[in-house]
């Protein structure tokens, strides 16, 4: 792909938005509003969170292919945001079918709505879910006509990006037609000794409400209505396969008629070999 970087030309025309949480200006190096069918080349945009630039890649489709929709693809914790294209067949297959793919760099984000005094300072520099919705999605809507409510919009993610996909689908059921979550986790209280989540929320014993309610898909399961594909490898040694199985059970118990599909690969691990194997199913 040829990445087209459009440099910042005029500070007065730079798109900016103040986040309720951090009041950080969102500045973009792309200033021209485009009809979605006019995105002729792969494009990179840069938005800021707390003064740090974060790039988002937009993978275009060919003129010969009719536009069918847009896929928001979320990467794993501290993995490359371009891995969906570099390490799986998602982007090539989506492009051939007429789907634009959007790949944001979320770094070490766990898609929390906010950070806390106990959050590790080196982790709190990465965008929150609030920034994602109020800044990134809004910018893509206003500047590229992507993720408008009347478009065909889909979201997927792997590992921590899977949790992000589930949280964003939960809170934006009017925006996303369907979601896919691979090797994800949904309820941080599944392991209250987790040093990973302790780094974000503080100790469970002292901050139970954060662990049990904030950013917890299971806690808000009654509001989860987006059709979802769930995939997990049984030999996953990073995210326990039981988390996906339990989420599937809880989802069906609360929404017996929901459109949800579960696939457990009996030999798969937490790697791109498995995630690539799920692309066709997604």
Image (spheres, rainbow, N blue to C red):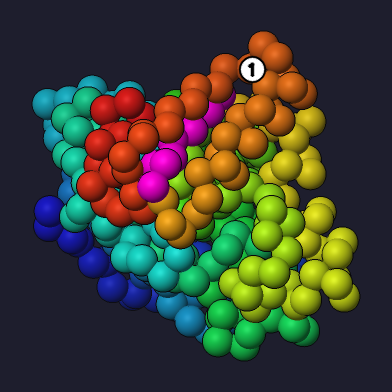
Percent x, y for residue 32?
Answer: 36, 56
Query: What residue is at 19 percent from the left and 55 percent from the top?
Result: 86
Check the picture and name the quadrant holding the C terminus: top left
Position of residue 86 relative to residue 15, above or below, is: above
Query: What residue is at 46 percent from the left and 59 percent from the top?
Result: 238
Classify residue 234 by image quadrant: top left
Query: What residue is at 51 percent from the left and 44 percent from the top?
Result: 241
Query: What residue is at 70 percent from the left and 14 percent from the top?
Result: 256
Closer to the camera, 252 or 118? 252
Chain part drawn in magenta? 227-235
The residue to which callout 1 is attached is 258
Q: Is residue 4 left or right of residue 19?
A: left
Percent x, y for residue 76?
Answer: 42, 59
Q: How many marks?
A: 1
Position of residue 207 relative to residue 262, above or below, is: below
Give the main secondary structure, helix, strand or loop, of the magenta stretch: strand
Q: What residue occupies the far top of the structure in this picture?
A: 257
Q: Residues within 10 Å of mark 1 (few under 14, many from 20)?
A: some
Position of residue 141 relative to residue 10, above or below, is: above
Classify residue 105 by image quadrant: bottom left
Q: Is residue 231 left or right of residue 85?
A: right
Residue 153 visible in rendering: no
| Residue 247 on the magenta span | no
Q: Is residue 158 left or right of residue 257?
A: left
Residue 128 visible in rendering: yes
Percent x, y for residue 203?
Answer: 78, 76
């Amino acid at each position: 792909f040829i990445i087209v970087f459009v440099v910042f030309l005029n500070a007065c025309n730079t798109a900016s938005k103040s986040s309720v949480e951090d009041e950080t200006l969102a500045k973009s190096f792309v200033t021209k509003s485009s009809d979605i069918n006019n995105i002729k080349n792969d494009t990179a945009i840069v938005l800021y969170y707390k003064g740090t630039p974060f790039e988002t890649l937009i993978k275009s489709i060919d003129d010969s292919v009719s536009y069918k929709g847009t896929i928001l693809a979320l990467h794993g914790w501290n993995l490359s945001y371009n891995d969906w294209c570099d390490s799986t067949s998602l982007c090539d297959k989506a492009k051939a079918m007429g789907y634009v793919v959007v790949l944001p760099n979320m770094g070490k984000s766990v898609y929390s709505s906010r950070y806390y005094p106990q959050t590790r300072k080196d982790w709190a520099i990465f965008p929150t879910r609030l920034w994602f919705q109020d800044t990134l999605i809004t910018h893509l809507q206003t500047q590229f006509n992507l993720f408008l409510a009347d478009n065909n919009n889909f979201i997927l993610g792997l590992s921590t990006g899977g949790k992000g996909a589930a949280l964003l689908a939960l809170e934006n059921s009017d925006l996303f037609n369907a979601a896919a979550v691979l090797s994800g986790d949904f309820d941080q209280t599944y392991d209250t000794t987790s040093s990973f989540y302790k780094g974000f929320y503080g100790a469970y014993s002292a901050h139970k409400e954060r662990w049990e309610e904030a950013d917890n898909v299971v806690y808000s399961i009654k509001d989860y209505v987006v059709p979802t594909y769930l995939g997990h490898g049984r030999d996953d040694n990073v995210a326990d396969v039981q988390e996906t199985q339990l989420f599937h059970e809880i989802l069906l118990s609360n929404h017996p008629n929901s459109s949800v599909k579960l696939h457990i690969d009996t030999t798969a691990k937490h790697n791109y070999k498995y995630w690539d194997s799920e692309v066709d199913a997604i």
